[in-house]
Amino acid sequence: MKEWVIGIDIGGTTVKIGKFNLTGELIKKWEIPTNTSDNGSHILNDIYASIKQEIPNLDAIQGYGFGVPGPVHDNFIEVAVNLGWKDVNLPKTFGDLVNNDNVVVANDANVATLGEAAHGAAKGLSNVALITLGTGVGSGLVINNMIIDGVNGNAGEIGHMAIHSNYHFPCNCGNVNCLETFASASGVRNLYHAIAENYTGHSLLDDIDHPSAKQIFDTAKEGDKLALQVVEEVADAIGYGCHVYAMLVNPKRIVLGGGLAKAGDFLLSRVQKAFLGYVFNPVKDTEIVLATLGNDAGIYGAAEMVRT
Amino acid sequence: MKEWVIGIDIGGTTVKIGKFNLTGELIKKWEIPTNTSDNGSHILNDIYASIKQEIPNLDAIQGYGFGVPGPVHDNFIEVAVNLGWKDVNLPKTFGDLVNNDNVVVANDANVATLGEAAHGAAKGLSNVALITLGTGVGSGLVINNMIIDGVNGNAGEIGHMAIHSNYHFPCNCGNVNCLETFASASGVRNLYHAIAENYTGHSLLDDIDHPSAKQIFDTAKEGDKLALQVVEEVADAIGYGCHVYAMLVNPKRIVLGGGLAKAGDFLLSRVQKAFLGYVFNPVKDTEIVLATLGNDAGIYGAAEMVRT
């Protein structure tokens, strides 16, 4: 008898594993390290061993959903740089290990979006975008309850959308002024350095050598004008990104997750205001909210792919 | 026996009607004026009468597809300003007239996208965006062969996406610097006036009082430097719009239609170049092509909705 569904979120450092019952409740979660040696060839075996230890009778498992850090199209992973993977047919390889053909894989940001749509900040909604504001900017899109992966798995790459700007922020992708260079932790620092350079007033940040995004936000919350100016520009960039999603795919709700979103309403209210400045009237009711599942969004979404 | 499918494209001035056989071939097309008096309440009756005249035996008709100028969600039209319509349940009203429950309606830009995807410049492709560069900028999106209409029918409104710019071009929608104010016929004129104002050289356009978009393009083709500068900026805006589609939904092909697209390769090559300057590497192979169905894209797509 089938009792469990497994949601697995493979990151560059750890693999998060969730054991869900058939109604989608998270019963237990745990982590194992991601062994990226030998081109990541041990990762799937490690996951298999870990699950087998937790649930010796694999026949009780209905299916396995995976989120991976890289573009996925039709369950095929061409490349996942952080794992060392190239041309991996995960459903086949892992399915053979566990003797189960209900194995599904998708991009981690898309999977997290599905998680927030199934159990989190967009519960029960079928048209949802997620933007994660962390070290970089990730994003996923669910339309009519389907993950939109695009023709080669690159949909939702709003983090590398170019922003017209007088700043000049090089991005890791090789381009300049991607949304990520404004709307991520490094974006906060980019904006801080650019604005501070010409700032003539005094700021509490003057005494800190290389303030982190968190320090800049905390200082802004204390009312520091320079820090506030940085936060306003970060919020403006996020609001612009939200408006682009609203105009192109008209989702019901846009969910903001990742480290920056921990600033809560302090950031959210500014993003909403910036959004309204950009968006045109018929989509102004698009809801922008904070994610609620945090780092668990991935395992929730992964489980959801094979549960339904 | 079912023999025909009818594709209907309702515009503010004319209604285009196409009679297709069951394999999707266009057998005959014709137009009738759009009677917008009395809140457009005669439009559906006029269409009914015109079809009945062409095909007296309505039982031979498998279904009727409609494109309308306004947001449509789940076959319901909340408002179509140009027709005088408000809260119209077209499938019910028209279905009762023709005694057929295979009546489907969608936004005209989305329907045209489906037309280009089924029979035109993106034939056989399941992930396609269309951008029509006419008086304004319209756009539609087909993902996995489905029209994406969004949660209240406003998906694909890339024409009103805000562009960061040092120009200040008011848009009909009430906002400023929408893509449409750069990438449409009026956008060409906006850019011409803004650039000409500070242009110190001589231009062939100096002798024309209010040059049209076509005149500006024709003059650019003759090598006029001012006109060329305008075309470059128009192409840049279109390329930016294409890059946003590519980054967010990763379609296989982006089709450019509408009056401006008649400039052909002269515009297209510049758009492709601008696109490559914005887009990030994994989606750089997104194809940007010219539409091939012209004004017939709507009836083709409309028919396609009920044929398949």
Image (cartoon, coloured by chain):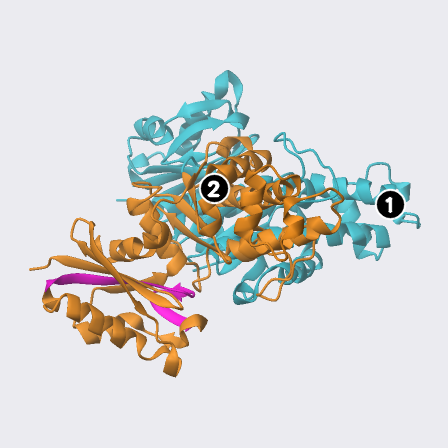
Chain colours: A orange, B cyan
Q: Quadrant of residue A19?
A: bottom left
Question: Of all residues shown, which one is farthest toward the bottom?
Answer: A38
Q: Which mark is residue B205?
A: 1
Q: Which residues are magenta?
A: A60-79
Q: Please state which of residues A57 and A72 is positioned toward the viewer in this rendering.
A: A57
Report whether residue B255 is seen: no
Residue at the (16%, 72%) spot, across then down: A99
Where is B263 relative to A246, above or below?
A: below
- Does A269 lie within the magenta span? no
User: Does dot 1 land on a helix, a strand or a loop?
Assistant: helix
Label 2 sits on residue: B155
Question: Of all residues shown, which one is farthest toward the front?
Answer: A207
In the rendered image, the quadrant that contains the N terminus of chain A is bottom left
Residue at the (40%, 25%) spot, across then down: B88
Q: Which mark is residue B113?
A: none
Q: Indicate which label's residue lies in the foreground, 2 or 1.
A: 2
Distance of label 2 from label 1 (alpha carbons): 38 Å
Q: Position of residue B30 (x, y in %)?
A: 51, 38
